[in-house]
Amino acid sequence: VKIGIDAGGTLIKIAYIEDEKVNYQTFNSRETDEASKWIKEKFNNPSICITGGRSEQLAGLLDAQPQTVVEFDATASGIKYLAEKQGYQLGQNYLFVNVGTGTSIHSVKESQQERVGGSGIGGGTLLGLAYLLTGKLDYEEIIRSASEGDRGNVDLKVKDIFEGSLPPISGDLTASNFGKKNAMASKAPSDADKVAAVVGLIGEVIVTISTQMAFINDTSSIVYVGSSFRSNPLLKEIIKEYTKMVGKEPVFLKNGEFSGAVGALLTL
Ligand code: ADP
């Protein structure tokens, strides 16, 4: 059996071939013991390729020394594989954006990836700010809460500033994330509103940087991957709409968060 592992800062992503198809498994990065135990119990003498920042830590717990691969290259080849399987025509040149604990932006030209930028604003920021603002720690609970919240109680929109008169840009654009200070002072936003606004802030920062990188690198498609999109339609929607608004094509791959693990698997 072949196993590809992407041991990241927050999550360990595993892709393996069973019954001739790719299967997926996830562990929390703090649970390296559970992950190695699961692998040892489930597979007999597997070939393993591992990538990601926590590779060494996890590799040390496995029976045989696994192969390793550079994370960015693994992610690039995983994206290419998943995109082809899912019928996307990405062409030779495109951008991919990995929204993990932080965010990393890569340009692909003739199948070679180059890291062209990044941001510390990512899925980790969502968890950290949500905790500071609401005391919530559980990812699923935070995301559920965000989907019930109203950013309009926290964010200042262009139309809030132009009250009544015609703004020079769409009134629905965010003028200032978390900028509705006076309204918040007179009526406190709910926890759900706050986390919805955090998702908005993160999505808008990431999509702004990513689309500018797409213009600089002259690519029309932007592939967004990473576990930050897991069960998070709000983040997806913000990034999708803004990407389309500036004339670029957003692509969200099914199982995109496993791109690195799939890429590691493909090297075996
Ligand atoms: P990394 O490779 O840095 O671990 P990922 O692509 O796995 O990054 O994305 C991590 C982010 O995914 C987290 O910061 C969080 O926003 C989100 N996430 C999705 N599912 C979970 C989960 N079950 N537990 C914690 N974070 C999760």
Image (tube, rainbow, N blue to C red):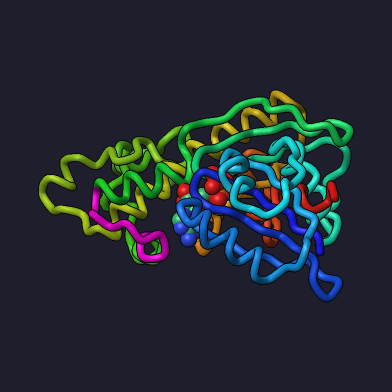
Q: Residue furthest left?
A: 186
Q: Position of residue 245 (x, y in %)?
A: 61, 44
Q: Residue furthest front?
A: 63
Taking depth in this image into account, of 255 and 241 the one nearest to the observer is 255
Tell me which residue sits at (61%, 45%) in the image.
60
Picture quadrant of residue 164? top left
Q: Position of residue 221 (x, y in %)?
A: 74, 42
Tell me which residue sits at (50%, 51%) in the image.
29
**Does the magenta run of residues contain 199?**
no
Q: Position of residue 102 (x, y in %)?
A: 51, 38
Is residue 207 shown above or below 130?
above
What residue span does the magenta drawing correspond to?
A: 133-142
Tell me which residue sits at (75%, 48%) in the image.
49
Q: Is residue 235 visible?
A: no
On the rendered structure, is 64 left or right of 105?
Answer: right
Task: Kindly report the secondary structure that dominates the magenta region of the rendered protein.
Answer: helix
On the rendered structure, is 185 left or right of 88?
Answer: left
